[in-house]
Image (tube, rainbow, N blue to C red):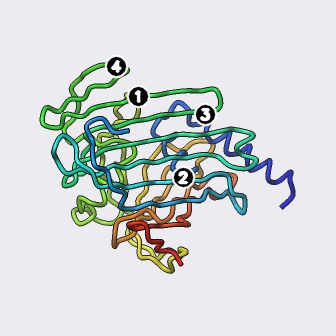
Amino acid sequence: MRNSEYCMHAKWLVRLETRFRGQAWVTALLVFIFLGQAGAVGAKTRERLVFDLKLGFVKGGEAILTIRDTTYNGKKAVDYHLKGRTTGVTDKVFKVDDVYESTVDAETYLPYRSVRNIRERKYRYYNEVFHFQDKDSIYSERTGGKKVPDNLTDILTVFFYFARNNMIEEINKGRTVVLPTLNGHDIQNIKIRFNGYEMVDTPMGPVESMVLSPVVDKGKVLKRSDGMKFYISKEGKIPVQLDFETRAGTLRALLVSYRINGKEQIK
């Protein structure tokens, strides 16, 4: 591919981020595409997933998702740690080095703690939020304490909460579920549509996957209001692919490495 095409695709990634900067949860999804525990102890890595981001044939970044079994205040918990960063030409045009972290209850998948640490060009943002699910309240380092909706999720674990609580069994294909979700220090209602199951070609071979779409307003970048699709394996409930339909083409985050207890699953 010519350097001019490479630069053009890199600039499109910048335009995408700029377009959605005011929509915090969409920015988090873009980090996923690009792609220290207060109270949590004894973390043991269970799964490690690495994703490549491509626009066409151009790799623009990578994301590493680490899942650890741990405890939080004496209760069984799961820690999700997502690090997204740009690479190559994209890193020179628009440098991103973001971290999202959530510690959730091992049974309900509702969060105990959420961290967002954003480093994008000169922009910096850090916030740590503690969840008190029994009191429907949170404490944010930025905004203090406040009451929140029942069963509040966060932006990193909302799709795991949806998939692993078997919500799909309760809705029909094409139906939408609305989940109150924390991102940074804002609370937004995320709409998730279940689009049925598809076989997805992955480095592991064909994987039967549930197809989930966060529903957003149609804009100048998105071709459709449901232009984002998450493919989560039916067995194991892990993300294997993410597509983001834009007017420049399809941004795709593809699982390229998957380790369970240190053993690579992709041959």
The answer for how far apart the CA atoms under marks 1 and 4 are is 9 Å
Q: Which mark is residue 63?
A: 2
Q: Earlier in the sequence, mark 4 or mark 2?
A: 2
Q: Earlier in the sequence, mark 4 or mark 3?
A: 3
Report x, y in % for residue 169: 23, 66
Q: Nearer the viewer, residue 202 or 19?
A: 202
The residue pinned by badge 1 equals 127
* Side of 208 relative to 200 (left or right): left
The residue pinned by badge 3 equals 120
Report x, y in % for residue 90: 71, 45
Q: Earlier in the sequence, mark 2 or mark 3?
A: 2
Tag 2, which secondary structure? strand
* Side of 244 relative to 153 (left or right): right
Q: Earlier in the sequence, mark 1 or mark 3?
A: 3
Report x, y in % for residue 260: 40, 68
Circle 4/circle 3 CB separation < 8 Å: no
The residue pinned by badge 4 equals 143
